[in-house]
Amino acid sequence: MSVVIVGIDFGSSGTGYSYSYNNSDEIELGKFPDQNTEIKVPTNIILDSDLKTIKAFGEKCNNYIDGHQLMNGELYFKRIKMNLYYNIFFIKPENDSRVYPIVDVIAKIFEYIKEEVLKTIHYNKPNLREEQIKWVVTVPAIWNLVQKGIMIQACEKAGLFNQYTDRSNFLALEPEAASLYCLKDKFIDPNYIKPGKSYIICDLGGGTGDIVTHYNKKNDCIDEKYYPIGGPYGSDEIDKDFYNKVFNILFGFNSFNSLKEKFNYLRNNNTEFSWNDEDELYIEWKKLQDEIQKKKKITEDLREKSFFLNCQIFKDFMKDITLENLVDNYNKSCEKGWQIKIHNKKRWILMFPYKIIFDLIYKQAELISAQISEIIQKVSDIESILYVGGYCSNEVLIKYFKEKFKNLCHLKPSNPEKAILKGAVLFGINPNIINLRISAYTIGFNCDEDWDEIKHAGIDKKYQYYDAINGKFKCKDSFHILIKKGQEIPQDYTITESFFTMNSRIIILKFFKTLNPNPVLFTEEGVELIGNEQLDLGRDFNLEDRNFNIILKFGGTFYDAKCIHEKSGKVLKFPLYFNNSY
């Protein structure tokens, strides 16, 4: 039995940890030394050029940058998590154009958190052994198996695994964790989430909008009623849109790397600048980023007002065009109502309408509303929506939802930012409380099935061949279905499949996913490769001794598997990372 449960909320914008002793509901929030927040710190990290040494984490990165210390090849990473959402397994630092394996960067973050957790735990319980700690790491429910596999690998690299680790419930799905927290939060009217009630959990964070639908059963059990849906609808996407739709049109730059590339080009051509190096340039860029971040925290009374930004960082790059021409060209091509004015020509201070921020939030709100509407159309007994995550503190966003879904009750826990952080520990205490999940995809792997004239009607005969060993016609490139889209998956759901392999020593399993509930071939349109696993049996076996059973456990938040060789009884366990990147 674990003595300590530790939950790590790895967020797009912020990261924190919480813990409890002896499976108690009394959950403490972890603290990071010399940081100015009690809940989460920014998910930012500075590493040396070899990704070996952590130079700064969280808010300490600001001091490191402001102190002009990015001078020795240090690499500054932020907004790391969204790369995984887009299935990008390599990441560019904020201050460098080269790419690095994202699993290594995430592993260093977990390594830092682990060290801080152990300091805290050992201060309170000096004799505690590391294997007595149960770790739980949060991930979006909408993430696929490949993205979850990267997180598992990063946790392994950071040393969060030990021989007692239950891989199948090591990851906590963020809105699920929030749901467990809300069930215990006294700020929420229990009549809307008591047994017999169905409700939507809308997790709105920095990177994604993550939405699940739960039914509260008796005996502390929760069933998922619709598979998780969502998308890149977090508050950080507003910044991204602002850079793309405003600064990119106005000045031609939407990232620091694009600015830095031109800086180096002009500097090599002996152009004079107001600053001396890239480090100083990045400090100015960061100041601009921080100002834009503040502008997102809007209230209804700002709708017709404007805000100011000092854009002098771009001045040296615009030698051949005046500020008046830049503004005029932008105003001719920008979206309606987004026109800007020059407030101070000498200091390049521009005046932007708050309508830009309102419009970008409304764009997000429309996308999220479409997802909620999809659930309401499919699940008839929804009575309430529970909002969690830092972005749900935006009153303009929540007002939009209240007007859009007037017949539903709109609820928030006492502290929406703590919901996932504390809920991760609750999930670690009792992962089986989520009794049933719905698969968002059809998942399967490659095989050569027996040719069936009905099932394979319309399939090109090029896929048919004669298996002389078994005396049958076969269909190559077949998609062998393990789980169908929309299928209910109870806890500890296990599938056992029998195989024969032509290879005497190696079994190769290619895993696929698709939105099609009934795929026939893995070469069909819309079928995506999500993993390529190889099982090495250690030596060659004769033809008659090549039968195997593959046992796959699907009931948790991450899948586990093992292979049993029928002849020898040899068992091989293998992790299903579902990616081929590493």
Image (tube, rainbow, N blue to C red):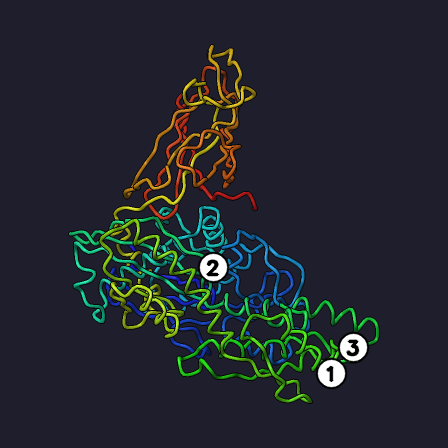
Q: Residues within 10 Å of mark 1 (few under 14, many from 20)?
A: few
Q: Earlier in the sequence, mark 3 or mark 2?
A: 2
**SS under mark 2:** loop
Kindly report which numbered mark, 3 or 2, lies closer to the viewer in this rendering.
Answer: 3
Kindly report which numbered mark, 2 or 1, lies closer to the viewer in this rendering.
Answer: 2
Whole-Å distance between the Cαs marked 3 and 1? 16 Å
Q: Earlier in the sequence, mark 2 or mark 1?
A: 2
Kindly report which numbered mark, 3 or 1, lies closer to the viewer in this rendering.
Answer: 3
Q: Nearer the viewer, residue 201 or 130?
A: 201
Q: Quadrant of residue 551?
A: top left
Identify the amino acid type marked 2.
Pro
**SS under mark 1:** loop
The numbered disc on residue 274 is: 1
Who's the residue at 61% across and 64% down the image? Answer: 93
Identify the amino acid type marked 1.
Ser
Whole-Å distance between the Cαs marked 3 and 2? 38 Å
Residue 280's place in the image compared with 481, above or below, is below
x, y percent for residue 11: 44, 64
* Residue 62 horizontal side relative to residue 256, left or right: left
Whether label 2 touches label 1, CB < 8 Å: no
Q: Nearer the viewer, residue 126 or 298?
A: 298
Identify the amino acid type marked 3.
Asp
Q: Which residue is mark 3?
A: 320
Q: Residues within 10 Å of mark 2 (few under 14, many from 20)?
A: many
Who's the residue at 16% across and 52% down the image? Answer: 219
**SS under mark 3:** loop
Q: Residues within 10 Å of mark 3 (few under 14, many from 20)?
A: few
Q: Which residue is mark 2?
A: 232
